[in-house]
Amino acid sequence: MNSPFLLSIAIFLPLAGALAAAFIPAAERGQHRAIALIASLATFVVSLALYFGFDASAAAPEFQFETKARWIAVAGIGYHVGLDGVALLLVMLTTALTPIALLSAWQAVKERVKEFAIALLVLETAMIGTFAALDLVLFYVFWEAVLVPMYLLIGIWGSDNRLYATVKFFVYTFTASVLMLVAIIYVGTRAGGTFDYVQVRESLQAGFLGSAERWVFLAFAVAFAVKVPMLPLHTWLPDAHTEAPTAGSVILASVLLKMGTFGFFRYALPLFPQAALHFRPAIATLAVVGILYGALMCLVQKDMKRLIAYSSVSHMGFVMLGLMAFTAQGLAGSVYQMLNHGVSTGALFLLVGMLYERRHTRLIAEFGGIARQVPWVATAFVVVTLSSIGLPGTNGFVGEFLVLAGTWLGRLQGHLFGQRVGAPWFAALAALGVILGAVYMLLLVERVFFGPVKGERDAALSDFSLREWLVLAPLLVLIVVMGLVPQPFLDRTKEPVDRLLARFATAEERLRGEDPLRPPATGSLPPALTRRE
Amino acid sequence: MTGLANDLASMIPLAILVAGALTLLMSEVFLTTDRRGYQAGFTVAAALVAALAAVAIPPAGRVFGGQAVVDSFSAFVTATVCAALALSALVGAPWLYARGAERGEFYALALFAAAGMALLACANDLLVAFIAIETMGLATYALAAWMRRGRRPAEAAFKYFLLGAFSSALFIYGAALVYGATRSTLFSEIPRASGPLLAVGLGLIGAGLAFKIAAVPFHLWTPDVYEGAPTPVTAFMAAGVKAAAFAVLTRLLVTVWAGASDGTVKFGSIIAALAVLTMVFGNLLALPQRSVKRMLAYSSIAHAGYLLVGVLSAGSALARQGAISAVLFYLASYTATIVGAFAVVGALEHRGAPGEEPSDAWDLSRLSGLARRRPWLAFAMAVFMVSLAGVPPTAGFVAKLFIFRAAISAQAYGLAVAGVLTSALGAYYYLRVVVYLYMRAPEGEEEPALSPALSVALAASALAVIVLGVGPESVAALARAASVIGQ
């Protein structure tokens, strides 16, 4: 099954669907929906073949399903794609959520169905490509190509304030990314004119970038931090999430944010480990502040979507904290938490979207006691909430536990009120975020689903339709399965995590030990100078 | 072939363009009916044959005693100019026909201008360059005045002529001073001389060329002229004049830099300052524009800034080849993009009586909701905007990638950073066009159906933009092969 073309098929199948849709008249809404659904489901099937064909053993090559082809050879840029375990899981997340998002918009999107189908399919191609790319420029191309369809999704099918939100989204992320382009070109030029990831990493091993490494790391880190988003670069997110249509919010939260943390995991950390070690306390501090800030902001939100958007800031803070722990548990938990956030937050946005379709409002105060009218919606919402707050038995618990344990075990150093503090403080403050998470999510459930029925409008609500069951059931099953049987997923993250840890170990070694350019500290003169005497 | 025969053979592409122009002029004399449909087709054919000749004829090297150099570099630029001419002619035919202004002279002037541009691309002598600039300039002044009865076109043409004449005067005065310093008008003699006379002379020549490429602070004419000139002419000017002027600027500077014995990059800091000013102000001034044509004019200024970054990167011997090929690739991709964008503008313009353009003729609102009425036209415009913004996977992205790669190889990190940051600024106003295309409700009257010629031009340029963005390898290799100057 390990065909070299399988991955490229997965990348470009959605694009082929989009091309097919482009040549069908816009009036044929049913056909457009069908094409989009078939193309995205077929992509999911292909990705299943990838999943089962993947060899997670230590003896397997680092990147599988590799394809290497000429692209812009004069500039040392190639079409090079391949998957490691982490990229594989994120590709699976993408291919699983795209048909779900599409199905969720089956009725919500009535206008311009053709453009919707095309935008969503192009977006899927760009997202899979981002995770699969093994050439820095190719990665950048896919990374930026994500922006245009997402821009259209928010700007055309979003709610009232959509234009502001979508322009903010684009300008914010585009501006942050262009500096990464300069950094990519710099790194490629210094690495001898190649942009191939494996070769670049090889030549960076020696750490020859010197003082430039920190600048280059920062350029990458800022681009990724905006996408994650990390405080204080998060302000585009509440607007974009709130104004986007349900399908857009789902894709944005579930997949797009992961591109940022994946960028750290694949590029910023392994390529520039010494700079990463240098900035580690600052990033970890921002992550913890993000966890608490996001959670506190959730407590005061009136709009359900905005609340979930801020909860994303909080949850993605956990992912970043796990990455910065530099321990096996932390990194594995961080990857697991990426998947969890994709599943749970995606499900939350879907549920809010369903409520919105019924009531045309997202304001928490407009709802009350609807659990009696829609018991299944309430049940699903509670299950997803429990996953989101990390109750044991759900997927959220596994991820958060690993992140917190990994942080505790890590050798993080930071400052708190002028005092040097160790890793346990980071873990403890992050755990406070878990508690706050339970508070705001349970308050949300209580206000919307329980208590007295607010008005007559709530009395006539209908429960899940068959389509809505189809949309949510896979995610609910995943929540339980990933909570009870995490090992298959964790197995696939083991090799990439170990490799990253090994790079950190070498970098620490080098930092602690000699700097070949610096004269010995003892004060003795180098041989060339002593001989002259 | 030797001597004169060789020299003349190297000028075949030029001769084709001029012959085409003369034939059209003659045919106009013998015309008995009003049917001028053949003229655009003839122009396109002449342009394509000239482009083919430029590429197919093996480079002759130095001809006419070294006053011109016919190499792959000039062939690439000639082909680009001819492509711009062919596309603009296709845009122009329906535009002129709808306004009752189609005449053979229009196409003849465009062909003469293209001949001037092609000559400029091989000029290796200050006087040849001057003659080429004037040939190109006089023809384009006349083209800009084509719809002379309107207030705006007349103003545009007058402004263009005055400032163009002024810049020519600067150029020729500078050439005279350089001649005084070097006792020759050949480019290749310049690096052997030095002193204040030469510096002032080169500075004046540079100022004259900066007018032509519309670099800040020599850009003041651009918005008015671009807006007032007939849209097909604007397209041709934006693509062709820019390509030709950058070709001669590159050849001149690279000759000076390559000939410098100590490897100094003369005028490096001045050009860097010009580049940064041009990128910053071009993009900043484009931000508040509501007229699409004016916005594209300022954007063309900004793009001159990116090209200047590329030219300056050629100052470093290590990065020279990469930089020249980046400039060439940028010119090709910019030609496809900007002609396409102006083609869309031309297709949507109000058609009043000649010279009576309403003030909102090119307002953004003309694009409102275009995606619902004409999905393909809107898609093409969106592609052009995305490419101008430099977002992958379009030609504009690859072109910027090459430019910044050259800048980084030349260790001009500051310029690269300034370039990407200003292009992020640009994303805002290009995407505003996409907002109007896709996210606003339609308003105003229905635009007329697209003519076949315009559809061909649009499809060709949109396809070129996408192909250059997805599979740029072949054109990039051509540009690479054409990146050797001065042999």
Image (cartoon, grey):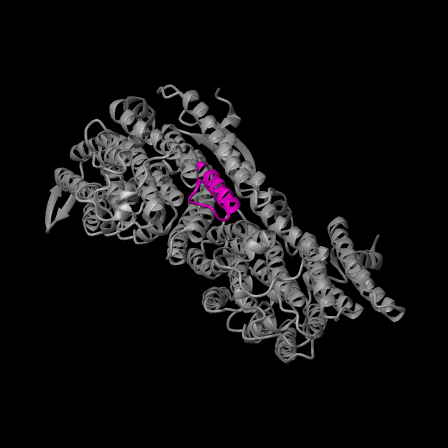
Q: Residue at x 43, y 42 (%)?
A: A107
Residue B1 in sight from this viewpoint: yes
Q: Residue at x 56, y 47 (%)?
A: B469
Q: Please state if A207 lies on the left or on the right of B479 as rendered.
A: left
Residue B396 picture location, percent across and down: 54, 53
Magenta residues, dominant SS class = helix
Q: Quadrant of residue A281?
A: top left
Q: Is residue B445 above or below residue A282?
A: below
Q: Quadrant of the C terminus of chain B?
A: bottom right
Q: Is residue A383 above or below residue B80?
A: above
Instruction: Give the residue at x 29% y 24%.
Output: A481
Instruction: Report whether A130 appears left or right of A291.
Output: right
For this rendering, which residue is in front, A370 or A71? A370
Q: Nearer the viewer, residue A57 or A468?
A: A468
Residue A200 or A302: which is nearer the viewer? Answer: A302
User: Could you say which quadrant of the image residue B177 lies in?
Assistant: bottom right
Residue A161, position as x, y percentages in the image: 37, 57
Give the quarter of the image for residue B420: bottom left
Instruction: Specify whether B339 is left or right of B37.
Output: left
Q: Is residue A119 magenta?
A: yes
Estimate the x, y position of residue B260 in percent, counting from the top left.
56, 61
Residue A260 rendering spot, x and y as whole percentages: 35, 43
Residue range in magenta is A106-128
